[in-house]
Amino acid sequence: MSPAEKGSDRNEGHLSPEERAEFKRRSAEIGRKLNAARPQSGASKRGQGSKDGSSNELVGRALRLSTELIGGIVVGTGLGWWFDTYLMPTVFGVKTWPLMFIVFFLLGSAAGMLNVVRSGMKMKTGPSDPSKGPAVPDDEDDVK
């Protein structure tokens, strides 16, 4: 039935007690269906992540990796600029301005990416500490 047929537009938005009870019943039913449809593992992970600070750990890792990449690029670019400007402004009478800048920018970028890969692998596998884990026998050890 449309609201006009029920005559509810004369009530100017006011609900009768029966309509209010029906509305509450339908709201509760929708809430139960939504809770049943929600995956339980995702909700528990979200709550657990905020409790133990794993999201802060992930942000810290991301900042560390981005700092290593940017640091490599900045250092390489700075060295290239310094070489071109002060150390060798001309070689055999030829100005070398962009040459060292470009070369050291590329070297700094490669070094930054290498640091990111190394740090990422260390975060993934854990630190390489020989005191942890089982010892690997050498060729000289008597293995029986």
Image (spheres, rainbow, N blue to C red):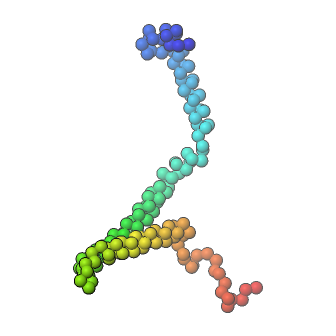
Q: Quadrant of the C terminus?
A: bottom right
Residue 37, located in which quarter of the rendered image?
top right
Asked whether, in this view, residue 1 is left or right of residue 99, the answer is right
Q: Identify which residue is drawn at 44% across, 61% down.
A: 62
Q: Is residue 11 above or below residue 52?
A: above
Judge by depth and name the residue closer to the eye, 45 or 66: 66
Q: Identify which residue is drawn at 53% across, 13% down.
A: 2
Q: Quick check: can you spot residue 64?
A: no
Q: Quick check: can you spot residue 113?
A: yes
Judge by depth and name the residue closer to the eye, 1 or 38: 1
Q: How many marks?
A: 0
Judge by depth and name the residue closer to the eye, 47 or 33: 33
Q: Is residue 88 above or below residue 61?
A: below
Q: Identify which residue is drawn at 43% across, 16% down.
A: 13
Where is residue 126 shown, x and y percent of the image?
54, 70
Asked whether, in this view, residue 41 is left or right of residue 112, the answer is right
